Amino acid sequence: MSDIRITNCHIHTFTSQHVPRDFPFPAVRFLRKDPGLVKKLAWALRMLGQEHLSDQLRRLHQFMIQGALPSQAQILSDVVSHYPDDTRFVVLPMDMQQIGRGPVPVGLKDQHDELARLRDAANPPGSILPFATVDPRDEASVQECLRAINELGFRGLKIYPRLGFAPDHPALMQRIYPRVAELGLPVMTHCSRGGVQGKDTCDYTGDGFTRPYAYRSVLHQFPQLRLCLAHFGGQADWTAYLNAGETRGRENWMEQIRDMIGGGQYANLWTDISYTLFQFEDFAPILRLLLSGEQDASQRLRRRVLFGSDFYMTRQEELSERAVSIRLRVALGETLFSQIAQINPEVWLDERAEDKTLWTGQG
């Protein structure tokens, strides 16, 4: 194999101490005593067609098993063991203080500070790339995000609108994005129908905050912001695409992202394949087709897809991190895998220059 320095652009290391006491519902405090029961309930809800509740329970199961580790360092050690020694990891924190599910034992400042220590102690140096996060509804969170960027020197911003806020929230548009753009930092945002959702945020509202088109105002006001829509729209939309089926709201987010990037209007719009590609047998052939064309749209997309895994959420899947990354490398071939796992991340992180003549608008 060729010498590829992989950058995994999407992992998590937060522990149960960073998760609200009652997430995803109050009875969880009793279920924590029996993780096996949680897994069975998740399966039963899926059989009953309650996909969102099932997804929440499956994630809870991971919080309970993986998140029960006492430190972010131990979680990081787990994922690192699946990759070559020179792999780099973009670590994405979460701020769930405002989702209405009870208190969070360890606050965002301490979570950020621990990530800074992991970065400083990384071996090899430079292999841990922490991002700051923010909930723009909370002034303390806004100030902490700016501290992590300005004082701790974090490498980018992670937002999670499905928690209950719009991606063009005034605090983001007026205070966070301008500073991120000024520093030339990338942004990662959650973009799938699953995941963590605020207590008072219904599926319809959550989709409205999360859909790819919700970011058009951000992209227009900050055209140089390197914005990545994580999960390439999510597994539900990939499944709907594969089966010519409908999705909630009758819009397919995978197709939206493909068209927004391929159309050339947004030169700095990106996506990643985190979590989605763990449904490997179904989706790897689609990804290869999307990235293999020679038309301008395919070439643009090929240069805007990032490798990421979504560890440790992927612990609920049958395939391991190592298994998926190896299978993906074989399925795509060395050239395409190098593009999404090394070249594209280096461009997104502003470490490598690129020719943008493929895009009609220069960003």
Image (cartoon, helix red, strand yellow):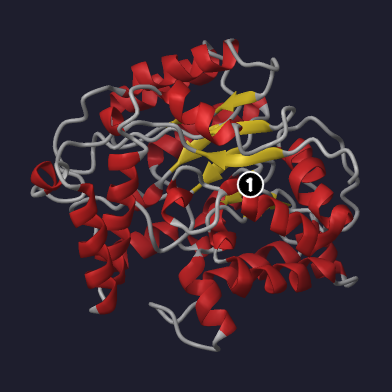
Query: Tag 1's secondary structure?
Result: helix
Look at the picture and state if 287 lies above or below 329.
below
* Residue 31, x across and y down, in percent: 13, 48
Task: Report the residue marked by disc 1.
Answer: 322
Look at the picture and state if 246 lies above or below 261.
below
Residue displayed at 62% across by 32% down: 89
Q: On the rendered structure, is 101 left or right of 168? A: left
Residue displayed at 28% across by 64% down: 54
Label 1 environment density (alpha carbons within 10 Å; few <14, some 14–19, many ≥20): some
Nearer to me, 255 or 320: 320
Look at the picture and state if 362 lies above or below 206.
above
Look at the picture and state if 288 lies above or below 85.
below
Residue 98 found in image quarter: top left
Nearer to me, 183 or 73: 73
Q: On the rendered structure, is 278 left or right of 185? A: left
Residue 67 found in image quarter: top left
Q: Quadrant of the C terminus?
A: top right
Give the farthest residue toward the bottom.
244
* Residue 339, x across and y down, in percent: 82, 50
Residue 37 in sight here: yes
Residue 266 in sight here: no
* Residue 238, x across and y down, in percent: 55, 73
* Residue 181, x across and y down, in percent: 62, 32
Residue displayed at 53% across by 64% down: 233
Q: Amino acid at mark 1?
A: Arg
